[in-house]
Amino acid sequence: MSDFNMNTCEECLDVTVRPDGVDDSGNYKFVCKLEHTGHQSYEQSFGIYFSTHISVVEAPGDIETEANGNHLLVKRMNQMNDNGLVEVWIKLSADTQPEVTGITDITCIPDENAQPTPVLGPVAKTIRARRSTRKYKPDALPKTVIDQIVQAGTYAASGMNRQSSIIIAVTDKKTRDKLSAMNAKIMGEPDSDPFYGAPAVLIVLANKDMPTYIYDGSLVMGNMMLAAEELRIGSCWVHRAKEEFESEEGKNILKSLGIEGNYEGIGHLILGYVDGEKEPAAPRKDDYVYYVE
């Protein structure tokens, strides 16, 4: 297994975890490398997710650990200077070889009396990595992958938790092509494919009777885009769902699915394996954020 790295892109800790073999008792050894920048730190902590349930066999004296299922919380109670580098080891017991699947909850205390400074972990990495993909391979996505993305959408925040949105997951090629043709006609380019060859389309609609329905549906779309990125699946928000499902053809599609209610199309999330390299992120504009302190 290769090293698992979490670079926070912030002034705090860059944490790398690597396997270090098995000892004579069959315990699995891991080395955690902490690189610290920006300020002194008097305490550091982070969480590690493994592929299987684990328990701690041994750790150094200045390390506290807490295992809960497949998650291990590691706390180091010692000073690190600016630009410091420390390696700590732990021994774990598990039924099978544990693989590191995530690093999270990275924090450090900048002075002896301060509160911990939390730093975003995998969430920030996924947010920064997400791009809109406009070129896809034709290969179908496994249903298990689509199910995970859809479930992420169902956990989006909504006004008063009314859950005004619904999701239609389309993998049937005939239906997918029909929706693409409807969308292209609305766009005024009937010979194009607004879905860029993506084999799967998730349609988000929301109940217009709810005052927050547009925002609710937009949050569902955002959750699903981030879930797709974490699963290394390309995605792109495609508009004109509103016009599609205001048409008689769109209304008939909903009726054929047994969907009744005052729904408005919010957007399509097209999904598939990326064909080509991901573009780098554009620079963030200078006047994006204003602080009132």
Image: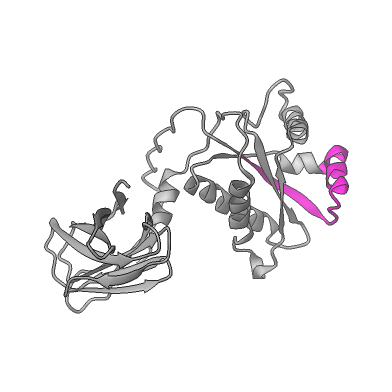
> For this rendering, which residue is in front, 76 or 184?
76
In the rendered image, which quarter is residue 202 located in?
A: top right
* Side (left or right) of 229 relative to 158: left
Res. 12 visible in picture: no
The x and y percentages for residue 155 are: 60, 62
In the rendered image, which quarter is residue 223 located in?
A: bottom right
* Side (left or right) of 224 relative to 7: right
> For this rendering, which residue is in front, 242 or 235?
235
Residue 259 among magenta residues: yes
Question: Looking at the image, which residue sits at the far bottom?
Answer: 113
Q: Which residues are magenta?
A: 246-270
The x and y percentages for residue 128 are: 41, 47
In the rendered image, which quarter is residue 172 located in?
A: top right
**Rendered residue at 36%/45% (across/down):** 286
> For this rendering, which residue is in front, 272 or 131?
272
Residue 174 among magenta residues: no
**Rendered residue at 63%/35% (across/down):** 140
**Rendered residue at 56%/40% (across/down):** 235
